Image (cartoon, rainbow, N blue to C red):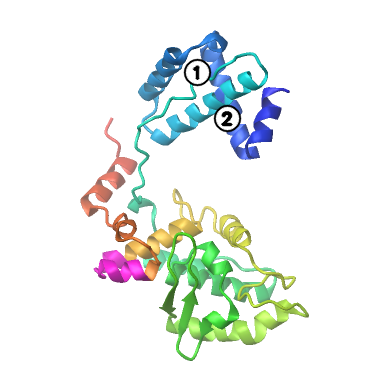
Amino acid sequence: MKLNEYLQKHYTKKTAKAYIREIEIYIANNPNNKKYTYPEVVNYIGVLRTKYSNAKTINRILSSIKAYYDYLCFTKIRKDNPSKSIKLRDKISRDIQLQDLFTIEELEQLLNVKQERYTALEHRNKVLMSLLIYQGLQPRELANISIQDINLEQATIYIKATNNTNSRTLPLKANQILSFQYYQTEVRKKLLKENQTEKYLVGIRGNDYTEIDITSHIKHNYKGIFEGRKVNAKTIRQSVITNLLKQHNDLRIVQSFAGHKYPSTTERYKQNDIEAFQQQINLHHPIK
């Protein structure tokens, strides 16, 4: 079995492609790699630290090297994997990058960006996007909304719990009410045709609109709108939460709104404004 075949069998297509690229670089820079022991591999990681400051990059390269030596063991070229016990202590930053997020005004621009070929889908998508930019929901949460979860009389929506978020009932904005009502009474029925489902968001063939569908929709239809910043469900949600904190809302209120299980998760969005400002300066005016 060739290396490429081995990687594709044990990893996703995307991961296998990334790994083969890093392995080719490793082999080119280390001709005697098949005879390497633990110290030689560690030395190579040391060289990487002088080239890369991003811990995620170094971890990815180490993972590819481990996969390479696993392959050599699998094909009986080696009896051991010299990189197996190497564990990096580099801290992968989980800080929210404030300079990459969007203001309330920028988020609302997304409601009128894409004109769909089908009018019904255009109305459906406005409902979807409004739930992202006003309630800050995750794609999984959006896909799990049932028709019973919407209460237009009380102007609320119930969000079911997921593995990493709590259940909660959130208020709907005034401008969402009429849009939701029209979607429920006209658009959704038209999309469903003869199909039956309790899910609130449905596709053009009346099928459930899944988490993957939602993620793909945002990725393909909102790409490049804000130069240098990625528009996806994650950055939209991060923007919503960050904007709430910037408005000096109590941390516990924002935690409840976002469905965070722990206050520490919400606190990650409270980066120092001076730090964010410095990041912006470094991005646009790097010191030579």
The residue sitting at the bottom extreme is 153
Residue 58 rendering spot, x and y as whole percentages: 43, 29
Instruction: Name which residue type carries label 1.
Output: Pro
Would you place residue 213 above or below residue 111 in this image? above
Quarter-wise, where is residue 260 in the image?
bottom left
Badge count: 2
Instruction: Pick the residue in front: 122 or 76.
Output: 76
Query: 161 or 233, which is in the foreground?
Result: 161
Say which of 88 and 92 sits in front: 88
158 inside magenta stretch: no
- Considering the numbered disc 1 on the image, is that residue within a helix, a strand or a loop? loop
The residue segment tinted magenta is 244-256
Q: Quadrant of residue 261?
A: bottom left
Select label 2 or label 1 by which is in front: 1
Q: Which residue is mark 2?
A: 19
Residue at 59%, 59% in the rendered image: 221
Q: Secondary structure at mark 2?
A: helix
Find residue 207 and report its image quarter: bottom right
Image quarter in which the C terminus is found: top left
Residue 64 screen position, x and y as percent: 54, 28
Q: Are marks 2 and 1 in contact (CB under 8 Å)?
A: no
At a point 44% along the width and 67% down the height, the residue shown is: 136
- Quadrant in which the N terminus is drawn: top right
